[in-house]
Image (cartoon, rainbow, N blue to C red):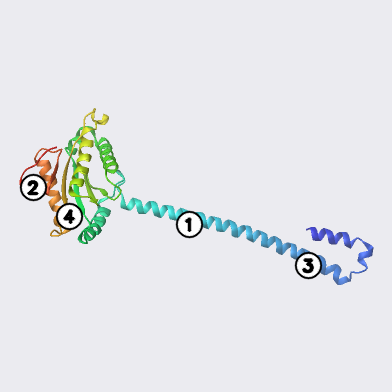
Amino acid sequence: MMQMMGYLLVLFDPFYRLYLSSFDMVSIPAFLILGTYVAQVIVTSGVEVLVDLQASMLAKQDLIVRNAIMTKQSKTDGLTNLYNQSSFKDYYEKAFEYANSGMSMHLALIDIDDFKSINDTYGHRVGDIILEKVSLIIQETITSSDIAARYGGEEFALLMFEQSFKQAYALVERIRQKIALMGHLELGGASITVSIGLKSYNPNLSKDKLFEEVDACLYAAKRTGKNKTVTSLDLTSSFVEKI
């Protein structure tokens, strides 16, 4: 535009017009008009490309966030935010392979006592709140290397690593005691209890057999009074001690 204005000023100056041919009089303004148009097209295209690039980047970021959320949702339980049963099985299988190579591993199953009566008496919404509270205690008590999952219903599974059997036992006992000492307004101030089965990895056991033996420990805890941790040692000696 500035070039065109400059040319018009020259065009109306008789002195400079002497140096312009008829072709110059036509070609120069045509060139200036065409150049201005091309420049405008380039600027407009550049803006559009920038807008498209920004939109593409935002869409890519949104896709990354959505994929991350979907991945987390596929691995965790929506209510408790712990791992779900499917992802726990995957971790358990991998952990068993590591244990075969020499890493210490302990498996515990935790079950809320008389949970059905809670649902029947107070409703499923209160039951969900209790599940959330129990899962929070588990998360706050375990170490960063442990894996906790809601295995199904009111049952939780826990894999513990890098510690002795005595330390694993002390950890699940802390979970049990914390739960037993907590009152719940939703239950009129009453507390709840959990029963726990615990066993360490043994190279003579398959992963399925280890799980079955831990489940047997859990069943023994339920059968002999609840609110206790039963280990394979207790079953072997036929003695269950409540702490």
Q: Which mark is residue 201?
A: 4
Q: Residue 181 sits in which quadrant? A: top left
Q: Nearer the viewer, residue 192 or 204?
A: 204
Identify the residue at the far left of this view: 238
Earlier-in-chain disc, 2 versus 3: 3
Q: Are marks 1 and 3 in contact (CB under 8 Å)?
A: no
- The quadrant the C terminus occupies is top left
Residue sitting at x 78%, y 67%: 31
Q: Do the residues labelled 1 and 4 touch (CB within 8 Å)?
A: no
Query: Which residue in the structure is indicated by mark 1?
Result: 60
- The quadrant the N terminus occupies is bottom right
At numbered mark 4, what does the secondary structure look like: helix, strand or loop? loop
How far is mark 1 from mark 4, CA to CA?
44 Å
The answer to whether one can see residue 154 in this image is no
| Residue type beneath disc 1 | Lys
Residue sitting at x 18%, y 36%: 193
Residue 53 location in percent, x, y?
A: 56, 58
How far is mark 2 from mark 4, CA to CA?
16 Å
Residue 228 location in percent, x, y?
A: 14, 39
Q: Which mark is residue 31?
A: 3
Query: Which residue in the structure is indicated by mark 2?
Result: 235
Is the residue marked by circle 3 packed among few (<14), some (14-19), or many (20+) residues within 10 Å? few
At numbered mark 2, what does the secondary structure look like: helix, strand or loop? helix
Q: Are marks 4 and 3 in contact (CB under 8 Å)?
A: no
Residue sitting at x 55%, y 55%: 54
Earlier-in-chain disc, 1 versus 3: 3
How far is mark 1 from mark 3, CA to CA?
43 Å
Is the residue marked by circle 2 packed among few (<14), some (14-19), or many (20+) residues within 10 Å? some
How far is mark 2 from mark 3, CA to CA?
98 Å
| Residue type beneath disc 4 | Tyr
